[in-house]
Amino acid sequence: MDSDLLLPRPEGLYCPAGDFFIDPMQPVARAVVTHAHGDHARSGSGLYHVAAAGEGLMRERLGAASVVHAHDWREAFDLGDTRVSFHPSGHILGAAQIRIEGCGKVAVVSGDYKRDPDPTCAPFEPVPCDVFVTESTFGLPIYRWPSMRQVVDEILGWVDECAARGVAAVLFCYALGKAQRLLAELATRSERAVHLHGAMLRLVALYREAGVHMLPTVPVSESARGKDFAGELVMAPPSAAGSPWMRRFGKASTGFASGWMQVRGARRRRGYDRGFVVSDHADWPGLLRSVADCGAKRIYVTHGDGEVLIRHLREHGREAFPLRSLGGQMPDLRSSEEGD
Amino acid sequence: MRRFATLFEALDRTASTAAKRDAMAAYFAEARPEDAAWAVYVLGGGKLKRTATSTELRLALAAETGYADWLIDESYQHVGDLAETVALMLPESEAAEGDTPLHVWMEARLPSLSRLESAERVEILREWWRPLPREQVFLVNKLLTGSLRVGVSHRLVVQALAQWAALPSDLMAHRLSGTWKPSAAAFLALAEPERADEHAGERPYPFFLASPLEQEVTALGAVDEWLAEWKWDGIRAQLMRRAGGAVLWSRGEERLDGRFPEIELAAIDLPEGCVVDGEILAWMLDEDHPLPFAALQKRIGKLKPGAKLLADTPVRLMTYDLLEWEGQDLRERPLVERRAQLAALIEGRGPTLMLSPSVATPTWDALAAVRGESRERRTEGLMLKKLDSPYRVGRKRGDWWKWKVDPYTVDAVLLYAQPGHGRRSGLFTDYTFGVWDGEKLVPVAKAYSGLDDSEIGRLDRWIRAHTIERFGPVRSVEPTHVFELAFEAIQASGRHKAGVAVRFPRILRWRTDLSIHDADKLDDLRRLASG
C-alpha cells in the first residue's frame, strides 16, 4: 500500500510516515508546499517547508508571521521517518516537486509542472521514483503547446494590429507565473514597456528581485488620467475583465493567455477577442514524457478529469490510479475552467 | 485556401459585425472570383453534399495518429467538434506545400470522395491532411461535414457583398436568393450595375421578417393604423405564379418543388404574374383550425409525399401578402393596398389557398383579449402590421411585429446532462429534465439555453461532482435541482417515453427555492396536451 506515504485527507495530501501535509488547504502543524499559487499555498499552518528559490513568493503569500524553512534544490532533510527534498517542477518561480523517501520506497509529488522552457524558473527535473503523483490539468491529446516563439509572434502581431486600429491591447493572464513568463519572453523580442494592473505589481517586483530579466513595466495607476493607451500592451488578471477598471482604455482589444485557449469553443465562450495558447502546465506529451522519465511503478493522478490519462497509461502497461483511490478523501478544487 | 483561412480566422476572432463585414468585403476584393464565389456560398450557410462520414474521419484520424478509438471519442466530447478534434490531434504538418485553391477543394477534391469506396476515402483524407497546416485541416473537415458557423449570417454576407460591389444590399439579397450557383461568372455578375428587369425570372423576393414585440403594445400608437392577424405556426413560403407554372419557395430560399403538390395545383388557377407570401399549414378539410406543427413536420421531409400521407395530412397556404401583381413589383405599395388586391385574388378560391383573416382591432385592450384565444385557434399569437408599410427586406424593426402568447411553463428536475458544442464545448450544457410520474421522475424535455454563463459554470461543476452514472457522453445526476422551463406547445406523442412532446423548451429560471418534490407531475402535462 502506498497510503503509508501518501494519504488524501480533507485538509490536503497527508504523509503518515513523515507526519506532514503537502499543500494543505486548512491549517495543519507541518506543511510542505510545492509552489505559491493560492490553491497550493494557504496561510495558517504552524510550519512551512518550501524550496529556497520560491521563498520570496511564499513569504508574500503566507504572510510575514508564518514560520518558513527554505531548502535548496535536492537538499535532503528528515521529517518523521522520511527524508524529503525539493526538485524543480518548471511550473513557476520556485515551484517544486517533493521527493519523499521512506517505508522502503521513493514517492514524488510533482505538484503542478511543465516541460516547456521557461526563462523565469528552473526546468523540470525528472526524479527517479517508485510512486509518481502527477497532475492532469490538460490530460487529453488535443493539448499540445505551440512553441513560445510562435506565441510571442502572435502577441506582438496583435499589439501591432491594435496600434494600427488605435486601440489598447489588454492581455489577461494569471498574475503569478504567466505574467512574468510572458514579460520575460517578450523581453527577448521587444523593448517597449508594458502597463500593469495593480494586482501584478508586487509579484513582478518579486521576480525582478529573484533576478529574472523582464520587459520594463509601468503601473497603469501611475499613468495620467485620460492617458491614451492606443497601441500599448496592458497586462491584467482575468478578474479585471469587464470591471470598471477597463473603462480607462476606452475601446480595447482583449486577449487571454491560457492553455484553455487551444479549443475554439473555449475561446469563443470566454468572449475575448484573441486567445493565446500558453500554459504553465504540462501538455499531453509532457505528461506522458514525465511519467516515462521518472520510471515509477505506480502513477497516481490528481486534478480534473484524470480518467483519460489513467486509462491511457494502463493501456500502455503502467499501473495508474486516481489519487483518491489511496483512500481518505480530498476536495478536488479544480473545475474544468480553472487553472491554466 | 490560405487566403480563405485567413479570412476565417479574422471572422472567428471578432464579435464585431462591422469588423466581420469589412474583412469579408476586403476578401471579396482580393480573392480570385472562382474562390470568392465559394466563400459566398459557404459563409452564407451553404454546404456540399456530405461525401465522407464522421466514422470515416475518425478512422482516418485513428490510422494517422495511432490513438485508441475511446481516446478520440473522449477528445471529441471535450472539443465538441469533430473537424477541430482532428485538427488538434494530428501531428504537426511537416512541409507546407503549394496552396490548393478553395474552388478546387469545393468543385473537385471534396466531391470526388463520393466516387470512392469507404476505405479509399479514409486513405485520401489522410493524404490530404498530411501537408496542411492545422487551420486548413479544420476548414477542410468543416467543409466536408457541414456548415462553417463563424458567426456570420446570410444577411451579413449580403451586406459585405453590397459593400464590395457598391450596390444596395436589398438588390444583392435578391441576386443571391434562390438557387445561386457559385462560379466565377456568377460572382462577378453580383457586382454588375442594376438592370431594369432585375426582379423578373424565377427568383423569390427576399422575405420581410417580423420582430418580437418587446414593448407595451400601446406604444405602437393608434390601433387603427395597424392590421392584426393570427400568427400561424407553419412554414413561411412564397408562391410565385409566372408564365410556365408555379414555384413555391421556403424562407430558407429553397425550392419546394413537388413537396406540396396540392398547393402547386391550386396555384395554377392563379393568373400569371403574381407572387404571394404566406404560411404552409397542415389542415384537414372541414376543420376550423390547422393541425399542430408536428403534423406538418411529417410533410416537411418528404420530397414526394405518397397518397396516404397526402390524405392524412393535407396542407394549405394561408396567404397574407401580395408582392407582385400583373407582373408589377408591389412591394413599395402600402400594405392596405396590397392586402385589398390579395383579398380580391384569393377570396372564394376554396380551401387550399386561404386569405389570412384580419382580426378586428377596436382597441388594444380588445385585441389583447382576443390574443388569449390564440392557443385554442392553434396559433402562436398575433401579428401586427402597419397598414401603410411597404414590404421590406429582412428583419427591419418597426412595421411588422409578432405578439406571441406567453409560453407554457413547468417546474422540472435535472436528470441528465451532456457536454455542449461550439461555444459550449467541454461544459455540461445540454440538459434533460423530468417530472413526476407517480414515484418516478420521467424525462419530458431537453433544453440547452436559458442560463447565464455563471449559472452554467456553477451547474457544470455540480454535475461533475454529482454524477451517478455515465452513458457515453451523457451523465445521470442525483435529482436535486429544479428548473422552470418554458415551452410553446405540448402534444401527445407515442415516440416519447413520457407520452408527451413539448415544442421549443428552454430554461426560464433555476428554481433554487424549490425542492424536487415541488416539481410538476406528468398528469398535469398530459392534461395540457389533451386540452
Image (cartoon, rainbow, N blue to C red):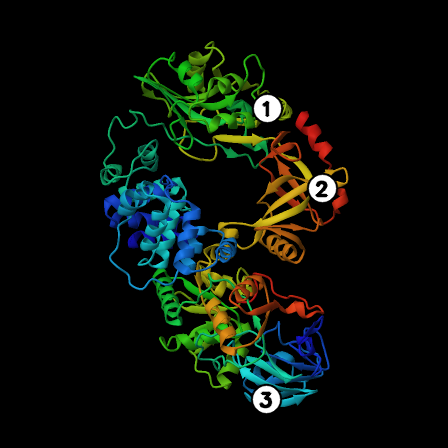
Checking the image for residue B378, the label placed there is 1
Q: Where does the image place residue B354, in percent across and percent down from the top left?
A: 48, 16
Local crowd at mark 2 within 10 Å, few (<14), some, or many (≥20)? Answer: many
Callout 1 and callout 2 share a chain: yes
Q: How far apart in space, not on screen, are marks 2 and 3 (Cα)?
A: 58 Å
Q: Is residue A314 left or right of residue B144?
A: right
Q: Please, what is the three-letter code of the amino acid marked with disc 3?
A: His
Above-or-below relation of B264 to B495? above
Q: Secondary structure at mark 2?
A: strand
Q: Where does the image place residue B132, in percent across and percent down from the top left?
A: 32, 57
Q: Nearer the viewer, mark 2 or mark 3?
A: 2
Residue B163 is at least partly visible in this image: no
Occupied quadrant, residue A45: bottom right
Q: Which residue is mark 3?
A: A71
The chain identifier of the residue carrying mark 2 reads B
Q: Is residue B292 left or right of residue B111?
A: right
Q: Please, what is the three-letter code of the amino acid marked with disc 1?
A: Arg
Local crowd at mark 3 within 10 Å, few (<14), some, or many (≥20)? Answer: some
Q: Secondary structure at mark 3?
A: strand
Q: Where does the image place residue A262, in percent across and percent down from the top left?
A: 45, 61
Q: Which residue is mark 2?
A: B441
Counting the numbered discs, the total is 3
Q: How far apart in space, not on screen, are marks 1 and 3 (Cα)?
A: 77 Å
For the point 57% across and 21% down, the residue is B361
Q: Please, what is the three-letter code of the amino acid marked with disc 2?
A: Leu
